[in-house]
Image: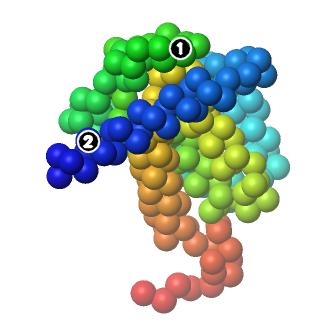
């Protein structure tokens, strides 16, 4: 088991260096810190939620609630996993890591940014098919930005993405089970068989 962990760590470090240093360019140097900063997402997210709630009908209320629950559970779970694994961030241990943001003292595995973005992307994917193409693309961009700015290993964002997808799927499945008529799974007014 120790050899497997050491091998994973070596590959993860090599891939981090490739993605963090070798692929640098002026456009990514500008865009990736923006994708990695939560405060820049607040206004577009608020506008998107407002638009969905106004024009999306009652189904959107349930999707928004499932999304909020998914982000909350994803974030809490990722923090609990970090507290158990204690993996230091690459910006603290890799000499020569290119750092474009502040390197916090919190642990690295999994990435909360990746888990939260993939949780909401999964809820959106399952609950609102019209936007399927946009949400995973945005979540992937945010996940990649965490490696590019130097604060996470690729393995951190990959584990975070899987965690977020699982949480997003579970929250959407619960919402669909609770109110299937809002998702079009049963005709409105029909009785469900138990």
* Element at label 2: helix
Q: Position of residue 51 (x, y in %)?
A: 79, 41
Does residue 27 sit above or below 101 in this rendering? below
* Element at label 1: loop
| Residue furthest to the left | 2
Choose top left, top right, bottom left or bottom right for residue 75: top left
Residue that numbered label 2 is attached to: 6
Q: Residues within 10 Å of mark 2 (few under 14, many from 20)?
A: few
Choose top left, top right, bottom left or bottom right for residue 81: top left
Choose top left, top right, bottom left or bottom right for residue 140: top right
In front of the other: 66 or 22: 22
Drawn side of residue 11 relative to residue 7, left or right? right
Image quadrant in which the C terminus is located: bottom left
Drawn side of residue 25 relative to residue 64, left or right? right
Does residue 61 sit above or below 91 in this rendering? below
Residue for point 37% across, 23% down: 89
Residue that numbered label 1 is attached to: 99
In front of the other: 137 or 92: 92
Question: Tag 1 or tag 2, which sits nearer the N-term?
Answer: 2
Query: How is the protein colored in the picture?
Result: rainbow
Q: Position of residue 117 (x, y in %)?
A: 57, 41
Give the number of marks.
2
Q: Position of residue 169 (x, y in %)?
A: 50, 60
């Amino acid at each position: 088991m120790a050899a497997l962990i050491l091998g994973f760590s070596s590959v993860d470090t090599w891939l981090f260096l490739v993605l963090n240093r070798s692929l640098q360019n002026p456009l990514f140097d500008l865009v990736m810190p923006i994708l990695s900063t939560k405060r820049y997402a607040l206004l577009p997210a608020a506008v998107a939620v407002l638009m969905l709630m106004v024009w999306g009908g009652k189904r959107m209320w349930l999707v928004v609630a499932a999304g909020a629950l998914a982000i909350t559970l994803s974030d809490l779970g990722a923090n609990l996993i970090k507290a158990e694994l204690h993996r230091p961030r690459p910006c603290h241990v890799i000499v020569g890591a290119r750092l474009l943001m502040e390197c916090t003292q919190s642990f690295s595995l999994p990435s909360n940014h990746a888990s939260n973005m993939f949780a909401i992307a999964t809820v959106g994917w399952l609950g609102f098919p019209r936007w399927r193409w946009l949400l995973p693309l945005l979540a992937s961009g945010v996940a990649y930005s965490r490696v590019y700015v130097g604060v996470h290993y690729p393995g951190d964002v990959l584990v975070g993405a899987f965690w977020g997808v699982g949480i997003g799927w579970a929250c959407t499945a619960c919402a669909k089970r609770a109110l299937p008529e809002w998702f079009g799974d049963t005709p409105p007014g029909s009785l469900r068989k138990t």
